[in-house]
Amino acid sequence: MCHLCDLGRPQDHRDSLGDSPGPSRRNFLRAGAAGAAAAAGLGLFTERAAAAPGHDDPPDDAGRQGRRYVIKGGHVMSMDPNVGDFVEADVLVEGKKILAVGPHLPAFGTPIDARGKIVMPGFIDTHHHQFETALRSFLADGLLLNDGQPHGAINYFDYILGKFAPVYRPQDVYINELFGALSQIDAGVTTVHDVSQIHHSPQHSDAAIKGLADSGRRSVFGYFESAGNVPGNQYPADAARIKSRYFSSDDQLLSMIMGGEIYLPGFEAAWTIGRQLGLQVAAHIVGPFGMAPTFDALAASNQFGPDNLFIHMTGMSDMSWQKVKDAGAAVSLAVPIEMNMRHGMPPILKTLSLGIQPSLSVDVECTLTADMFTQMRSAMALQKAFINQIALEQNNPPGLPELLTTRDVLRFATMEGARDLRLDRKTGSLTPGKEADIIILDAEAINVAPLNVVPGAVVSLMERSNVETVIVAGKVRKWKGKLLDVDLRRLRRDLEASRDFLFNAAGIPQNLFRPN
């Protein structure tokens, strides 16, 4: 890469640079298939037909080394204070990197016309159980645990983890991971931390990684336990093989996190292995699971570090919270799920009172949608509800916290997500030198027009239908409202076949209108 280009002073290399594919997908496929069952997924992608003359197609060879294109004339929200925002500006991309952001940049190749559109970094989801994609909506009325009441009979712990998860085959893992990832690309989520608690065998782990790789999205593979503790699982010892085989390079779309759930016996081994391998260590920290005493003990013995990512953080003591803050550990909130499934009140006030900037995560699609618009609106609305009620009841007492703004929650969904996943040097903002994870949002659509305030429009008005174009590491993955190079009809059939198998193997009747 040219030194001047990296500094944001673009040079013309069209005659001097080659045209070679990026290393990550090639190296993954060279490393070997994810098992015969998962390999059945090959061929689910379809080649794009050649464009007719004058056809409105994405830039040729986007994301390839040396290939340049410019996103022209958009309302650019960089999420980088040093770059700033622009009423009208361009973004210059070469290969997988952003070279420059600003008005009137020179055009290279076929420009992307972003007039009337919002150009911003892609969203980052720091906690998502993608292996559950085939179970979407199954638990829309359910809770995390059985509370002994009729509404608690069908619950996450007993059904999703206890009945469905143990019967997954590698091919089920693959199609669930792939379909869930593509769905989030469609919603503008360019990076995910996939918490895949489905590691019944090395073949299951390989299938999960292959699904993430084949999606072409930036993904952090969360190596968590085998839900249901299926005999023969090799968690956590298989972490070394997985890291060596798939995550030896830092220059790829895939990276890895070690899961270490503190409610499971022997979790200390997972934390030790993760740290020996130089990985972040993540865990769900949820009050109703009775984790507070264990978490307090870890806090008191100074076991937390900047390599920890704690998810939910409901029901924990002030002492433990302070230790999390002091250690520089990351906190991921899944506000809509926490409110719906009885994880405990989302600790948005506690997090912010300590100066911890949280990231946002979607958690489980068996209960709620996996788009980040819902996460941002929910987090902002909950914090405002708390603060507004205190203001009304106590007549604006001194020291009342400031209300969250739309820009605050946009930061949670971009830059804070990148920081929490140790990816902020690569993504999270439109900064020259970072990789081009970019979304273009339609601000002329009927649900948004006329545009008055960019952050307000994105958070308060938009949803996934406004996501017009999605770019991951310079490569266009969604264009003018359509995913590229994907045979969705075949993928959907394979996902439905997986769903039918899972319900049958788990002994759960399929009923589209199950009574409440």
Image: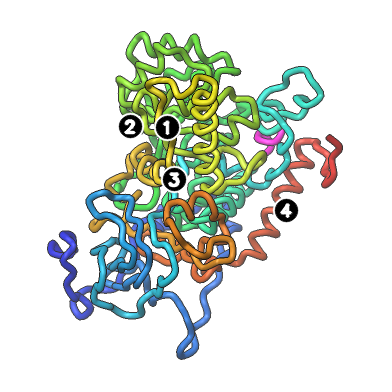
Would you name the residue on which mark 4 appears? 497
Residue 353 x %, y %: 39, 24
Mark pair 3, 1: CA separation:
32 Å
- Bounds of the magenta span? 163-167
- Judge depth for marks 3 and 1 and give the one in front: 3
Residue drawn at 45 percent across, 59 percent down: 452
- Judge depth for marks 4 and 3 and give the one in front: 3
Give the mark nearest the N terminus, 1 or 4. Answer: 1
Mark pair 1, 4: CA separation:
30 Å
Would you name the residue on which mark 3 appears? 406
Would you name the residue on which mark 2 appears? 277
Residue drawn at 36 percent across, 23 percent down: 354
Mark pair 4, 3: CA separation:
41 Å
- Was residue 491 drawn as part of the magenta stretch in this picture? no
Mark pair 4, 2: CA separation:
37 Å
Q: Secondary structure at mark 1?
A: strand
Residue drawn at 54 percent across, 26 percent down: 389
Would you name the residue on which mark 1 appears? 258
Give the mark nearest the N terminus, 2 or 3. Answer: 2
Residue drawn at 69 percent across, 43 percent down: 135
Task: Tell me if label 1 and label 2 are in contact, CB under 8 Å.
Answer: yes
